[in-house]
Image (tube, helix red, strand yellow):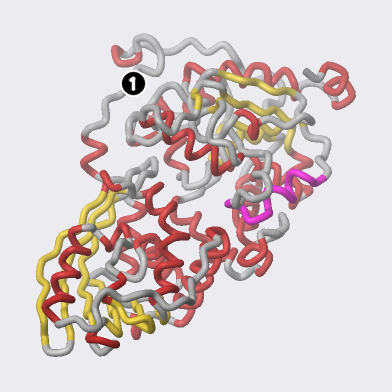
Amino acid sequence: MVDAPLRLLACVLPATALSQGRGYGSTSAATKTIVSGLTRLVNLNGGAKPANTKRPRRFASLTPQQVKAGLADDFRNEYLWSGRITPELYDEACVFTDPTLSFRGLDVFEANLRNLDPWIERFVPSERRRVDLYALAVDGAAITASWRMVGTLALPWRPRLDLNGTTTYTLNGAGGRISSYDETWALSAGEALLQLLTPAAQEVKEIVEPEFWPGRLAGRAPTPKARAPLVNPPTVVVLPGFGNDKADYATPLGLPEETGLAAALGRRGFRVEVVPVARGDWLQVLTRGARDPDFLLFEKARRTSPAFRWYADKVSETLGKVDGPVLLVGHSAGGWLAKLACLLDGAVAARTVGVVTLGAPHVPPPEGTPCATRGVLADVAGAAWPDVALITVASDAIRGDRGGDVEAATAADAYGRVSGNPEGLGDSVVPLSAAHLPEADLQLTLPCRHSINVAGTSVPTDDWYGAERWVDAWLGPALDVVSKPRWLRKLVRR
């Protein structure tokens, strides 16, 4: 395989280009261009470059049987996921090809791996993946392998990638080494995309429902404290976070509708709309961002970049379906994207009485730490904010600790990527230091979690911002803020 992380991208992105290719020759030019651009983007973030130096060789030449034995070792090391190949087996000018990418050079392959390894370890750690070798045979001047790779991604819906393929290693390199690596897949791009967007069925069956409020499992109703205003109440528009689906706020992880944020807000007398974002829509950050040089190459993308403009357009379309004032409630990235929507569309800002952000990363990472938004967040943070009440809600529940339990270790990884500092307090995904803004009309810090699942697991939780037990803690104060005129908000800002 050319690269395990690239396989995840390559499986998804061809479908967006309407490609059904199983081999490089049958993949569309558009798909190849996108994946090539994404490879360059990740390499720019990672920083590792090809060594371009002559490496020492242990053996002057290798027999086909020796190469076969080395490849067998690589399969035992699960190289299709880990990228841990035996360089001794490959010619320096080896051409590596899979259905979406082709390049020349063993040192290029190794540099790609160094840059991409952190991503694969984050989303498909070793305990969640495996490789099965079905056959490995010498056929003249080539070796053919048939295999299967399976992995469960560390995402809230726990998608499972299950891919069969064949790799042909041509032995025409110096000293009988591999001169050509050619990989084909049994799965079409569309089928792979469906896998990545589908929750694992076995996980749903194993869900143990949290209580959410005392007596829920016995049929008892909650007793909300915050209530919608009697006169001209705003419609609450929920903005999903990165990678989230509209369903996560209605039936989180397949739990009953009553457990969702939308139902919690509805119990308090609000009309609720969730911006209709599907998981697959988030691929547009990459596919559209690849068209923006400032996003793709320089990490200087502006708020008008197509990478996230599509999301702001969805917010505008959602508001077009409701009347009257709205209160935007943005979870995670949906928080700063709520700000983006107000900045890009004056009509959205004019109808918005307030923006409430729940665990949103508002502060760009420091210099030297790659920003996932490629500059868009910095541009939004530096923009003049309109006359719209702003409430930031954060958490200090989890301390990042790489040596701690799964949640603490996951938090440390996430905090490091958001702020450059893996330690400190936060909600297990966004550190406290990045979730508040000094210009906010109100800053609230709660001891709750970030998401509908316990970080690093598929276990549902009733301890996140949008759960029944926490909604009143931020909704009541937010309603109090948005009811005041701007001059009075400034006067009483806390």
Could you tell me residue 252's position as x and y percent?
Answer: 39, 34
- Which quarter of the figure has residue 365? top right
Q: Residue at x 26, y 30 (%)?
A: 207
- In this picture, residue 331 sits left or right of residue 202: right
Q: Is 18 located above or below residue 256 in the figure?
A: below
What's the residue at 44%, 12% (across, down)? 222
**Residue sitting nearer the eye, 152 or 410:** 410
Residue 130 appears left or right of 84: left
Can you see residue 20?
no
Task: Name the image quarter holding residue 424.
Answer: top right
Query: Residue 292's quadrant in the figure?
Result: bottom right
Q: Amino acid at mark 1?
A: Pro
Give yes or no for residue 382 being in the magenta stretch: yes
* Quadrant including the N terminus: bottom left
Horizontal side of residue 161 vs 473, given as left or right: left
Q: Point out the image quarter for the C terminus.
A: top right
Circle 1: is it few (<14), some (14-19), or many (20+) Cα within 10 Å?
some
Q: Which residue is mark 1?
A: 210
Which of the two residues, 345 or 25, is positioned nearer the viewer here? 25
Front residue of 185 and 481: 185
Between residues 228 and 80, which one lies in front from this camera angle? 80
Report the magenta residues as a range.
372-383
Q: Is residue 185 visible?
A: yes
Q: Secondary structure at mark 1?
A: loop
Residue 407 coordinates in the image, percent (x, y) = 40, 30
